[in-house]
Amino acid sequence: MKALVIIDMQMEMQHRIDAGRDCVNSDAPDRLAMLSEAFRKRGQPVIHIRHSADDPASPFHADAAGHQPMPCAKAVEGEPIFLKRTSSGFASTDLEAYLRENGITDLLVTGGVAGYCVNSTVRAGADLGFNMTVVGDAVITFDLPGLSARTIFDVTMAHLESDFAKIVDSAAVLAAWNRAS
């Protein structure tokens, strides 16, 4: 069974976009909303992974405005939400157990950010034997000192595609489902 995985699409990401940070796929929230709707209409699981920091000064602390999900990533009733304290969605959650208990073998990964939590979650999932697909245009990336967002995104996607995941775009996912319907 396939599931859509939404990683860290929390208001801190929107704050970074609104602040004008160098970003790849600032329109990823729109694609994510379309993918979520398509998965829900087909009765396919949508899984939410959110970062939750212990440090009260972190924008991802439970009391911080940045911790809340973006509108595109709000869970509907019954959808699982995993709160992680590490980069990988597997390392500090029960995600693996949930996937195995529910017969989910194929993960379509979206969210943020490419070089961090998307990267580590995809690699961990592949190492655990899950079929990993990254929906590239539904993944956001921000710059780092001395590195553009585009460079980070392109290198991350190349690494993931070389050994850990298939990289697709949201239009291909939706088109494949429309052909299968």
Image (cartoon, grey):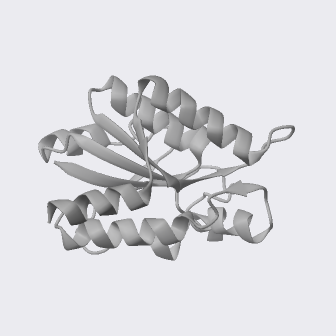
Quadrant showing the C terminus: bottom left
Task: Give the residue drawn at x 73%, y 47%.
Answer: 149
Task: Give the residue drawn at x 29%, y 69%.
Answer: 38
Q: In the image, residue 54 lies at what x, y percent?
A: 59, 49
- Most extreme residue toward the front is 179
Vertical relation: 145 (above or below) 51 = above
Q: Is residue 25 left or right of residue 21?
A: left
Q: In the image, residue 109 lies at what x, y percent?
A: 40, 48
Closest to the observer, 3 or 65? 3
Q: Can residue 19 be seen in this view?
A: yes
Task: Give the residue drawn at x 74%, y 71%.
Answer: 18
Closest to the observer, 34 or 84? 34
Vertical relation: 63 (above or below) 145 = below
Q: In this view, does 176 lie to the left or right of 144?
A: left
Vertical relation: 156 (above or below) 51 = above
| Quarter occupied by residue 77 | bottom left
| Quarter occupied by residue 60 | bottom right
Q: Is residue 64 visible?
A: no
Q: In the image, residue 32 lies at what x, y percent?
A: 45, 65
| Quarter occupied by residue 115 | top right
Q: Is residue 17 left or right of residue 30?
A: right
Count all numbered tags in the image, as a single digit. Answer: 0
Vertical relation: 142 (above or below) 62 = above
Task: Give the residue drawn at x 33%, y 56%.
Answer: 173
Q: In the image, residue 141 lies at what x, y percent?
A: 65, 50
